[in-house]
Every structure is written in C-alpha cells, then in structure tokens.
Image: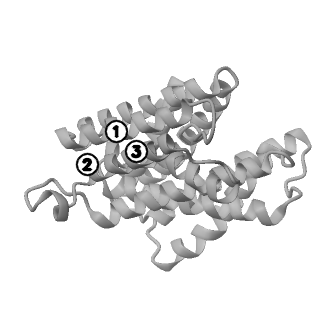
Amino acid sequence: MSVAALSFSLMSLLVKLAGRRLPVQEIVLARALISFFVTWAYLKRRGLRPWGRRRGLLVLRGALGFGALLCFFYSVVHLPLADATVIQYTNPVFAALVAALLLDERVRPRDGACIAASLAGVLLVAQPALVFGAGAAELDPVAVAVALLGAVLSAGAYVTVRALTATEEPLVIVFYFAVVSVLGSAPLAAVNPVWPTGNEWLLLVAIGIATQLGQVHLTKGLRVEPAGRALGMGYLQIVFAAAWGVLFFSEIPGGLSLAGFLLIVSATTLLARWPAGTRAPAPT
C-alpha cells in the first residue's frame, strides 16, 4: 500500500509538471490511452469479453470516472499538491451521501457530524476571503470548486461500481472507464492542441506508468486488509503530495490548512471504520 501511495503521489507530481504548458484534457487523454491499451491487453490475455452485460451503467460509471479524473487533474495543476489531494480525499464523505440517496443507506447523526467536519476542513484549506478576510491565503475558488466536483463525481463512480460488481468483471469496468475517457477527452484536446515536447512525452508516459503501478499495488494491498490499508494509503498519499509540493514548488501549508487536513482525514477515517449504518468507502 505504501508503494501504491507513492505511485499515485508521483502521478500527481507528474501531472502538475506536465500541466505547466500542456492542457489538462491532453494529459487526461494520454493517461486514458495508456489505460485503454493496458486493460485491453489484460482482457485479451484472460479471454474476457470487454463489453459486459449492463452497458448503460458501465457507460455511466465511465462518464463519472472521466469527469472525476478531469476535475482532479485540473485541481492538481491549479492548486498546491497537498490541498488538491486532501480535497479529493473527501470523496468517501460524498459517497455516503450518494449511497443514502440512491441505495437507501441510512445516514446517522454521527455520520452527519463527520460530513460537516469534513466540509469545514475544506473551508479551512480553501480559506475564502469572504470568510477569513482579505489577508487570508485564499486558494483559487474556481479550482477549489472543481476539486470538490471531482470528489463528488468520484463518489458517484464508487456507487456505480458497487452496483456493477455483482455482474461485471473488474477489468471490464476499468475498460469502460478508459474507453469513455478517451472518447470524452479526445474532442476537448482537439480544440486547441499543444504538441508535447520530448520531455513532455516522457512525462505523459510516466504518468501512465505511475498510475498503473499504483493500481496494481493498491489491488494487491486490498486483498490483505481492505479498510485499514486503504486509509493508510490515503494518509501517506497526502504526506507524499505535501513533500513533493515543498521540494518542487515551494508549497508550504499554513496552520489553517494543516488543521483542515486533520479535520478531513479524521472525519473520513471515522466514517470508514464505523461498523454499522452507513459506511463510507475507503478513499479512492
């Protein structure tokens, strides 16, 4: 799980470096193409049909995942790495709300308290001038809103995956995610294309490799201890992201941001570990 956390944090670092000049949609397209070919190869190797049974829901899961990926990459480029990562970490909170609405899962008062605490943590991280005054270290409000939207879409993707796992192979679900992401990002990338330089091609390939390594090691870790290991990975990923931000971009979190990190991580941990009622998923 530590290797998975390191790999995903490296992916975020590489996205931020590539995003200095390349449009986000091109980075998403490159990542989706690599995922498409790797997943197709796995499907062929195992002799599985790629199209699945519940195609409408598979397409919906792909669309939600694509939107979440686009939002996350945008937030990584336009926000400090640690802040973008910790806001994405709120997706289990939103998954609890979506599951309550669509799967009739119960949200208890203590669940609601954790959800409120997590959103208060986001407020501390974002530090809007309207609340904290003109002297606050305010983040780009558009980027924060996009990051939150990405967390909501990630939550929706999780709920659809839960519905699909009863009838679909995991590789088929991933394959639809890759297909929809390619089809969705290709027209966006074609609007104002920027041809990558030699170093940027290397960055794009490295993003795909880091993502694949993260997924492989995450899968292996989840076979051992799903909840605890996944939560540990979330903590480590935030730590790694903060370290890359300091080393490469001189992004040093302030006291309020650190308090927001603590609120979000604590609330997400409690939601995931409570054994009864509505349980949020481990961070995805």
Residue pointed to by mark 2: 124
Circle nearer the N terminus (2, 1): 2
Amino acid residing under circle 1: Leu
Circle nearer the N terminus (1, 3): 3
| Residue closest to the eye, 204 or 62 | 62
- The image quadrant that residue 56 belongs to is bottom right
Of the 4 image quadrants, the one containing the C terminus is top right
State left or right for residue 155 relative to residue 150: right
Q: Is residue 196 visible?
A: no
Residue pointed to by mark 3: 85
Residues at marks 2 and 1 touching, judged by CB atoms closer than 8 Å: yes
Amino acid residing under circle 3: Thr
Q: Position of residue 215 (x, y in %)?
A: 62, 37
Amino acid residing under circle 2: Leu
Residue pointed to by mark 1: 263
Residues at marks 1 and 3 touching, judged by CB atoms closer than 8 Å: no
Tell me which residue sits at (92%, 43%) in the image: 47
Of the 4 image quadrants, the one containing the N terminus is top right
